């Protein structure tokens, strides 16, 4: 999924902020990056998150594979037989 919006629970402490799926509270108006590469924002009524990942498309899936780099939120395409060699791809989606 590319993004989502989650409504904040009603009746909570006013001005407390948004609690993410890990239980961390973020101030209203703040932005943060999640461990699984989403950019999130805390609004008064909701939390909005969008994916930071762009997935390669148009490559030889028999010969090549995707490698996810968590630190940089990127995906590269390399040869299955020799992962030191990059594969050509047509574009990115996300």
Image (cartoon, grey):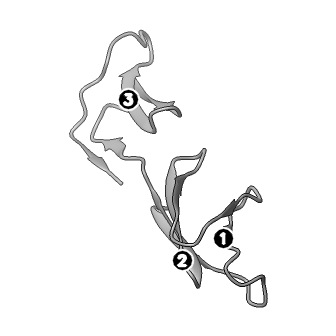
Residue under the point 48% across and 65% down: 3
Query: Which quadrant of the view contains residue 59?
Result: top left
Marks 3 and 1, how far apart at CA: 33 Å
Which residue carries the number 2 mark?
A: 43
Label 3 neighbourhood size at 10 Å, few (<14), some (14-19), many (20+)?
Answer: some
The kind of secondary structure element at disc 3 is strand
Residue nearer the viewer, 8 or 27: 27
Which residue carries the number 1 mark?
A: 18
Residue nearer the viewer, 2 or 40: 40
Residue nearer the viewer, 47 or 61: 47
Identify the mark nearer the N-term, 3 or 1.
1
| Furthest residue in direction bottom, as rendered | 11
Residue 72 x %, y %: 44, 34
Residue 71 x %, y %: 51, 32
Residue under the point 54% across and 77% down: 43
| Furthest residue in direction front, as rendered | 15
Marks 3 and 2, how far apart at CA: 33 Å
Residue 82 x %, y %: 41, 9
Q: Are marks 2 and 1 in contact (CB under 8 Å)?
A: yes
Query: Which quadrant of the view contains residue 8?
Result: bottom right
Q: Is residue 38 left or right of residue 57?
A: right
| Furthest residue in direction left, as rendered | 90
């Amino acid at each position: 999924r590319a993004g989502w919006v989650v409504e904040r629970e009603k009746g909570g402490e006013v001005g407390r902020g948004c609690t993410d799926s890990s239980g961390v509270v973020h101030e209203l108006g703040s932005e943060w990056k999640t461990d699984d590469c989403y950019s999130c924002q805390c609004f008064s009524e909701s939390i909005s998150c969008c994916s930071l990942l762009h997935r390669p498309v148009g490559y030889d899936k028999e010969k090549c594979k995707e490698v996810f780099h968590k630190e940089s939120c990127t995906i590269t395409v390399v040869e299955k037989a020799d992962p030191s060699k990059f594969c050509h791809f047509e574009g990115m989606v996300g």
